[in-house]
Image: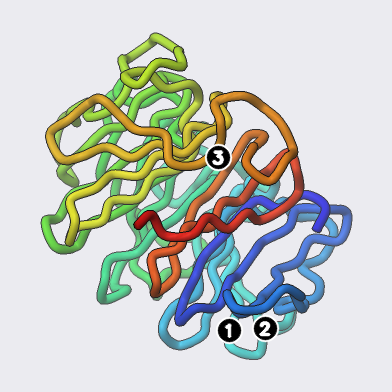
């Protein structure tokens, strides 16, 4: 891998998007040590960010360079791909357009996709059956100033809440779709820091509805933080808080995912690797 940007796990298979000179998606079993090309070539004029594989084997990749979401069908070929959301090479702020999309997530039934439309400072929802030109619905950030470069988004279907990594504001927001505002549940708005109550450029977020634990990719601090429900004091569970490339260190971690045994996988961006951290006992 050269420039890994996205990480997703389904059925204990890792899927990794790589925005290198030859952009592609890799796959490997969580028990394996060797990756293989899943989508061997996505053409050179794209910059894939996160990656999502649905229950039917379709692959969704937000592409920040062409301002759209590309959907690959189960043939996993460029010929079998479509622009699912946005207008290719035409960034914009209308309801059919995107600008710098970085991350997407789906509800549990995979009826809707929720996209972190980063440069438009909003979370926008589209049906999973959408095609280029269809309008979406803004579900968070409809008012100017609500969000500041949201990089990551996670949707909790069990309670109908969005969790947003509001990177430039150094916060995590909990947001009811269509509400006029969200609630800061980690970090302090506008303040970057490395203490247990502060964040620096959080890039992604995951909420475990069963345990009530919130996991935050605190990219600027080179660490992964976990928060108990109703607490804004986090605990570092991966990384050291200092940039490095040893087995215990991270360098701008970008995405996280868990396997069926609750082991943690971290896309360690600037180190161009995926790090596995065993489940805490």
For the N terminus, the quadrant is bottom right
Residue 172 appears in the picture as rendered: yes
- Which label's residue is closer to the chain start, 3 or 1? 1
Q: Closer to the camera: disc 3 or disc 1?
A: 1
Residue situated in front as seen by the camera: 220 or 240? 240
Residue at 38% over, 44% down: 205
Q: Which residue is mark 3?
A: 99
Residue 247, given in percent of the width and then of the height, sits at 68, 46
Placement of 1 over or under 64, stated as above or below: below
Q: Closer to the camera: disc 2 or disc 3?
A: 2
Residue situated in front as seen by the camera: 78 or 155? 155
Q: Quadrant of residue 102?
A: top right
Residue at 55% over, 37% down: 239
Q: Are marks 1 and 2 in contact (CB under 8 Å)?
A: yes
Secondary element at tag 2: loop
Residue 87 appears in the picture as rendered: no
Q: Which mark is residue 76?
A: 2
Secondary element at tag 1: loop
Real-space Cα separation, disc 1 to disc 2, in angstroms: 6 Å
In the image: residue 141, left or right of residue 121 = left
């Amino acid at each position: 891998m050269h420039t890994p940007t996205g990480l997703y796990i389904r059925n204990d298979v890792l899927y990794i998007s790589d925005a290198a000179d030859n952009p592609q998606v890799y796959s490997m079993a969580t028990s394996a040590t060797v990756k293989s090309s899943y989508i061997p070539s996505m053409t050179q004029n794209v910059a894939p960010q996160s990656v999502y594989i649905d229950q039917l084997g379709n692959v969704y990749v937000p592409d920040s360079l062409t301002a759209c979401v590309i959907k690959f069908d189960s043939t996993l070929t460029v010929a079998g791909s479509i622009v699912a959301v946005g207008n290719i090479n035409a960034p914009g702020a209308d309801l059919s357009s995107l600008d710098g999309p970085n991350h997407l997530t789906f509800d549990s039934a995979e009826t809707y996709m929720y996209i972190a439309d980063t440069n438009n400072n909003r979370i926008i929802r589209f049906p999973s059956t959408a095609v280029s030109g269809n309008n979406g619905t803004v579900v968070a950030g409809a008012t100017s100033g609500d969000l500041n470069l949201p990089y990551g988004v996670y949707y909790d279907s069990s309670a109908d809440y969005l969790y947003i990594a509001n990177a430039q504001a150094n916060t995590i927001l909990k947001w009811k779709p269509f509400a006029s505002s969200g609630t800061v549940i980690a970090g302090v708005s506008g303040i970057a820091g490395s203490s247990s109550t502060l964040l620096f450029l959080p890039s992604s977020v995951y909420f475990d509805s069963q345990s009530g634990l919130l996991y935050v990719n605190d990219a600027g601090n080179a660490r992964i933080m976990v928060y108990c429900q109703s607490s804004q004091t986090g605990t570092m569970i991966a990384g050291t808080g200092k940039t490095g490339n040893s087995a215990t260190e991270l360098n701008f971690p970008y995405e996280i995912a868990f396997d069926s045994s609750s082991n943690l996988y971290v896309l360690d961006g600037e180190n161009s690797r995926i790090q596995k951290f065993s489940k805490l006992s």
